[in-house]
Amino acid sequence: MKYLVVILFLFATITTFAQNHQEKPIVQFSGVVHNADSTNIIVPYVSVTNTSSHSAVTQTNYKGYFSFVAHEQDTIRFTCIGYAPFTVVIPANLAAKSYTTQVNLKATIINLPTFHIFPWATIDEFKKDFLAIKLADDDLEIARKNISRTSMVAMSNVLPRNAQEIQSANAQAMHTTILNSHSLTPNPLLNPLAWGSLIKSISDGDSK
């Protein structure tokens, strides 16, 4: 007996639902989804749900266009990520068997909480790296290292001569040439002092 009552109740419910939908005329519901802030911007791939017809879901195409069959007075819900939901109710007593509308979705801004990413898995690793950190030199220490004797000698060995140094060397060579133009240039091979210095260097093991 209980099963019979349940079956009769379900049959009555389905019959009532079918009659309600039969009473509502069928229409072709079409339209285009735009951005509410600028009607020139089309919103593609929007989910369109008919909440009055078992939540039937369809989707707009890449141009924001949609078209499907619905009933008058059906509630249509438009949802898309980044936009607020929008609901459209199809009017009743339409002269034509179609209804076209433009849907304008309002963009929503969601402020996410701030979070920080650290390269340390644990606090102990952070403490270890923090204690082993080497602070960079300040401007005064950098300048002090740049003018140290070691730095100056190293730079003098690798840096080429500038124009002023070349000009000074040429001028000194020309001056020496002019001074010795009317005299014999001394030959170091005939200088006994030079030979003595050479022999002493060889005996001392100086390869230079």
Image (cartoon, rainbow, N blue to C red):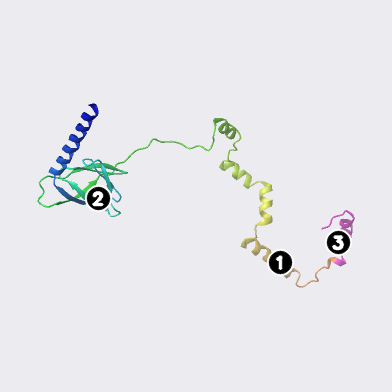
SS at mark 1? helix
Main SS of residues in magenta: helix
The residue that label 3 is drawn on is 194
Q: Residue furthest bottom?
A: 182
**Residue range (magenta):** 189-208
- Distance of mark 1 from mark 2, alpha carbons? 85 Å
SS at mark 3? helix
Counting residues from the start of the chain, the first of labels 1 and 2 encountered is 2
- Looking at the rendered structure, the kind of residue marked 3 is Ala
Q: Is residue 171 left or right of residue 187?
A: left
The residue that label 2 is drawn on is 34
Question: In the rendering, at what x and y percent does residue 191 appear?
Answer: 87, 64
- Distance of mark 1 from mark 3, alpha carbons? 22 Å
- Looking at the rendered structure, the kind of residue marked 2 is His
- Looking at the rendered structure, the kind of residue marked 1 is Ala
The dot on residue 173 is: 1
Residue visible at 14% across and 44% down? Answer: 22
Question: In the rendering, at what x and y percent does residue 183 appear?
Answer: 79, 71
Quadrant in the picture for residue 23: top left
